[in-house]
Image: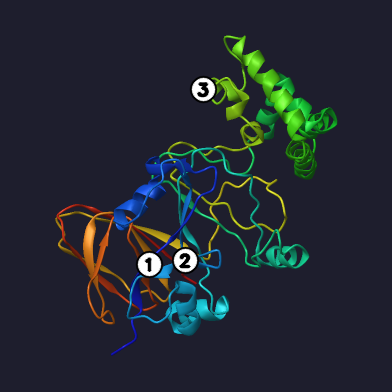
Amino acid sequence: MAAQRVFPLSCVVQQYAWGKMGSNSEVARLLASSDPLAQISEDKPYAELWMGAHPRGDAKILDNSILQKTLGQWIAENQDCLGSKVKDTFNGKLPFLFKVLSVETALSIQAHPNKELAEKLHLQAPQHYPDANHKPEMAIALTPFQGLCGFRPVEEIVTFLTKVPEFQFLTGDDAATQLKQSLSRDSQAVASALQSCFSHLMKSEKKVVAEQLNLLVKRISQQDCVECMACSDNTVRAGLTPKFIDVPTLCEMLSYIPSPSQDRLFPPARSQEDPYLSIYDPPVPDFTVMKMEVPGSVTEYRVLALDSASILLMVQGTVTASTRTAQATISLKRGGVLFIGANESVSLKLTLPKDLLMFRACCLL
């Protein structure tokens, strides 16, 4: 009998402080739905579900017939499951980490190095850059969310600097003046000035940031209207307290916010260790996420074979999965995660006449 190359996974939950709490989190709800023994703590955040073989979150294999206990261990001994191109290109490693995020508060500001820069940073400071791989990223909205990606038009930033003195204080008068003067110069001057403003803001001492935020909240609370984005999008009006606004909030005055009609973001890996240039166009990533919707009237659906290992997440629906290598069918319901080796197809039979919603991550080279 052929070695089994399709099997269910139990995936790692990361409880970062910015995640939604308890059963309010989609991560927690997916976990509870897929595992009846899961205990959800309502006083703990459930921020991310990691589906992959990352050393800090290697998924467990839910199949007692397989000797290896984690996906990373199994891939190390079954290299062909990655697909020929993927195996050779990424040195026998699964090249993507599939995640579900459930976000309550702003995440940290992030930079995404390309392969060359990632290797350099890893050598220089492995404690801060434990992974030598590049960091292209794609975010797909399961529910409405707001993300900041790149920078908004410089003219808008200059307007905020003019109308929000607390913002200009944290960016520095010299940097603010430099940015205002750059409007009449070339793009390199604008990029340099914008870098200076952003650096000053991000390097501001916490005490100084808190003081300026207190002043901002006090001023806004005493006015009927403030002509700045912080007022217009209700970021400040929602609570009128510095507890809910911080440096990431102030970065909204710098950052580009995609249209509400968009359901995905593509921050590509870059050759500089900064997020200073605007990002509007999707890159060609090393990975793909496929959205699959199947009406409940369809009794059987085939997940096609690819020349890449893939990971399938069931967001809605209940099925039994079977393949040519599986010794038995695999029950899969909401929150269930399935690893699919390269060149393996999977037959899904609907056990309930309800629509299916699935996402499949893979690497198509």
Q: Looking at the image, which residue sits at the far bottom?
A: 1
Q: Position of residue 234 (x, y in %)?
A: 52, 23
Give the alpha-carbon distance from disc 3 to disc 1, as whole Å.
40 Å
Q: Residue at x 60, y 13 (%)?
A: 221
Residue at horizontal 66 percent and vertical 66 percent from the top: 115
Other-residue count near label 3 (Cα within 10 Å), few / some / many at <14 / 14–19 / ≥20: few
- Going by the numbered disc 2, the residue's amino acid type is Gly
Residue 30: mark: none
Q: Which residue is mark 3?
A: 238
Q: Would you say residue 280 is visible in this rendering?
A: yes
User: Residue 87: horizontal and vertical position, in percent?
Assistant: 52, 79
- The reply, left or right, for residue 341 in relation to residue 243 is left
Q: Which residue shows up at 62% across the image and 25% down it?
A: 242
Alpha carbon separation for disc pair 3 and 2 = 37 Å
- Element marked by disc 3: loop
In this picture, is 16 found above or below 183?
Answer: below
User: Callout 3, which amino acid?
Assistant: Ala
Look at the image and tell me whether residue 85 can be seen.
no
Q: Nearer the viewer, residue 18 or 299?
A: 18
**For mark 2, does the 10 Å Cα neighbourhood hold few (<14), some (14 to 19), or many (20 or more) residues?**
many
Q: Nearer the viewer, residue 153 or 310?
A: 310
Which residue is identified by label 1? 9
Please identify the quarter of the rendering in which residue 21 is found: top left
Between the residue at mark 2 and the residue at mark 1, the CA separation in whole angstroms equals 9 Å
Mark 2 vs mark 1, foreground winner is 1
Q: Secondary structure at mark 1?
A: strand
**350 on left or right of 25:** left
Q: Which residue is mark 2?
A: 52
Q: Earlier in the sequence, mark 3 or mark 2?
A: 2
Find residue 9 and report its image quarter.
Answer: bottom left
